[in-house]
Amino acid sequence: MNKRALLIIPGLFFIAMLGLLLFGLGRNPNMVPSALVNRPLPEFSLPGLKLNASAATSLIASEDLLGGIRIINFWATWCPPCHIEHPYLVEISEREKGVSFIGVNYKDDLDEARLFLEEKGSPFEKIIVDLDGSLGIDFGVAGAPETFIVDSFGMIRYRHVGVINHQIWEETFAPVISRIK
């Protein structure tokens, strides 16, 4: 190999690395592709979170989520971003008509989850308990919070990774919901 080629190789490597860096910086970290978008909900049947000790435990199945637009939010008390997101979800769920919020308590302590919802309010119509994370695996969840928009036929239409706030709701969620209504 001649000396000229040896001088060009580090320069090409530098340009390639710079290109990868710029490509990565231009991407939105909340826009994570999902193999489930435009596919049906995974089939499941899991217990619901009973908010008081005397309530009977009920099962919630994927079929129970058909017939309306659902916002499925994976959350946990051990998740600091979930604490940030929660007041927005409570406010949005009270304001938005025709949309049901379904919580998935993800790999969490159930007593702490109950206390959290008792203290901070619950935006959720139903709360699914996913103690072992199996439903999260079926949804492709990497961590909490993650939120999915599901249409009335049970098709997943959008996936959001990270905290939902008013800006994200208005700029992202509202247009998707409007489109599928």
Image (tube, grey):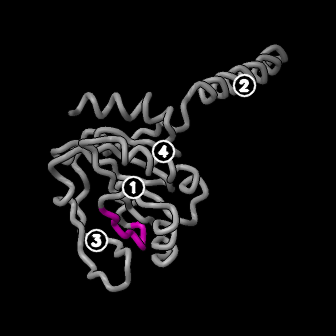
Question: From the viewer's perspective, is residue 86 above or below residue 149?
Answer: below
| Residue 157 image point, x, y percent | 29, 39
Q: CA distance from mark 4 to mark 3?
A: 23 Å
- Write the residue at 24% across / 52% down: 41
- Write the residue at 33% across / 48% down: 71
Q: Amino acid at mark 4?
A: Val
Q: Magenta segment range?
A: 126-133
Q: Position of 172 compared to 115: left or right?
A: left
**Circle 4/circle 1 CB separation < 8 Å:** no
Nearer to us of marks 3 and 1 is 1
List the residue tagged with mark 4: 161
Q: CA distance from mark 4 to mark 2?
A: 32 Å
Q: Amino acid at mark 2?
A: Phe
In the picture, the disc for residue 123 is 1
Q: Nearer the viewer, residue 19 or 79?
A: 79
**Circle 2/circle 1 CB separation < 8 Å:** no
Q: CA distance from mark 3 to mark 2?
A: 51 Å
Q: CA distance from mark 2 to mark 1?
A: 51 Å
Name which of mark 3 and mark 1 comes first in the sequence. 3
Q: Main secondary structure of the magenta part?
A: strand
Q: Amino acid at mark 3?
A: Leu
| Image quadrant in which you'd find residue 5 | top right
Q: Amino acid at mark 1?
A: Pro
Q: Position of 2 compared to 20: left or right?
A: right
List the residue tagged with mark 3: 46
Name which of mark 2 and mark 1 comes first in the sequence. 2
| Residue 12 image point, x, y percent | 72, 20
Q: Secondary structure at mark 4?
A: strand
Taking the magenta stretch, the answer to whether it contains residue 46 is no
Q: Nearer the viewer, residue 27 or 130?
A: 130
In the picture, the disc for residue 144 is none
| Residue 52 image point, x, y percent | 37, 79
